[in-house]
Amino acid sequence: MASTADDLLPEALRLPTEERARLAHKLLLSLDDGEARTGADAEWAAEIERRAQEVVSGEVKTYDAREAIEEVRAQLRARRRG
């Protein structure tokens, strides 16, 4: 029985951040139809590839969105008090 994206998504979301990044990267690469990219498209594709590789390699640290938002809120509260 073939799985649909809706069937796979809950399982994919349970993966650790790095694994989700690797999966997303591979899925994005699979969308490339092989046609030559030109201009801005080529530059964006190269930038996306570079950033994805940084995440997959562990060169950059990723943050959970909720944690990042709470960190910013904490910094704003501290500034208001200070």
Image (cartoon, rainbow, N blue to C red):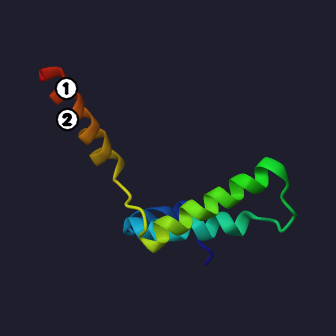
Q: Quadrant of residue 46?
A: bottom right
| Residue occupying the point 41% across, 70% down | 58
Residue identifier under label 2? 74
| Residue occupying the point 18% across, 21% down | 80
Q: Secondary structure at mark 1?
A: helix
- Disc 1 marks a residue whose amino acid type is Arg
Q: Secondary structure at mark 2?
A: helix
Image check: 35 left or right of 51?
A: right
Tell me the crowding category of disc 2: few under 14, some 14 to 19, or many 20 or more residues within 10 angstroms, Cα based: few
Residue 58 appears in the picture as rendered: yes
Image check: 17 left or right of 3?
A: left
The quadrant of the rendering that contains the C terminus is top left
- Disc 2 marks a residue whose amino acid type is Ala
| Residue occupying the point 53% across, 70% down | 23
Check residue 79 in the rendering and tell me which mark sits there, or answer none: 1
| Residue occupying the point 54% across, 69% down | 53
Check residue 15 in the rendering and tell me which mark sits there, or answer none: none
Give residue 33's position: percent from left, percent from top.
82, 65
Q: Quadrant of residue 68?
A: top left
Residue 5 appears in the picture as rendered: no
